[in-house]
Amino acid sequence: MLTIRNTAIALALFVAATPALAGSMVKVVESGEAGEPMTLTMDQTTVPAGDTTFMVHNDATTEEHEMVLVKLKSPDQTLTVVKAKHRVDEKTLKSLGEVADLKPGADGQLKAKLVPGTYMLFCNIKGHYEAGMHATLTVTK
């Protein structure tokens, strides 16, 4: 009887601890078509430091998107857009990874170990950043 009780307690503790072991998950939805407003939204804008999984969905019906993750030097840092290319100059940034070439309706995933600070998620397909496809994520201790 004692063994069953101890096993049940151990199982309950394991189940309770599992989300903490798994880290954070951020759901990202990218939407917008050419000539229309474009958005990149997250289900949460603040997560604790540690392993984070970004589950990315392209909600567009005809437009391909991508999601790039960079750590900003400061919360008010702005990204440089190369006007001739209508893209963010990624050479000046340290990308922590991306979900590239996400076809309409497709899903992708990015895993990253985040330290406290401010991060930006954005789509760097021509004109998409300028059309509003970016969002800021705060990582706390």
Image (cartoon, rainbow, N blue to C red):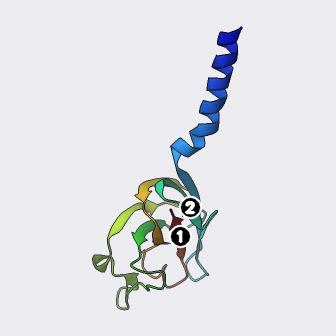
Q: Nearer the viewer, residue 73 or 66?
A: 73
Write the residue at 63% across / 32% down: 13
Residue 141 horizontal/vertical position (percent) = 50, 62
Look at the image and tell me whether residue 106 can be seen: yes
User: In the image, is 60 to the left or to the right of 54?
Assistant: right
What amino acid type is highlighted by mark number 2? Answer: Val
Write the residue at 35% across / 91% down: 84
Write the residue at 49% across / 54% down: 52
Mark 2 highlights which residue? Answer: 47
Instruction: Give SS at disc 1.
Output: strand
The tag earlier along the polypeptide, 1 or 2, is: 2
Residue 86 horizontal/vertical position (percent) = 40, 86
User: In the image, is 43 to the left or to the right of 115?
Assistant: right
Residue 68 horizontal/vertical position (percent) = 42, 68
Q: Nearer the viewer, residue 64 or 110?
A: 110
Picture quadrant where residue 19 is located: top right
Picture quadrant where residue 95 is located: bottom left
Mark 1 highlights which residue? Answer: 138
For residue 2, above or below residue 13: above
Instruction: Give SS at disc 2.
Output: strand
Marks 2 and 1: in contact by CB < 8 Å?
Answer: yes
Q: Residues within 10 Å of mark 2 (few under 14, many from 20)?
A: some
| The furthest residue to the left | 91
What amino acid type is highlighted by mark number 1? Answer: Thr
Picture quadrant where residue 31 is located: bottom right
Q: Nearer the viewer, residue 111 or 139?
A: 139
Residue 7 horizontal/vertical position (percent) = 64, 18
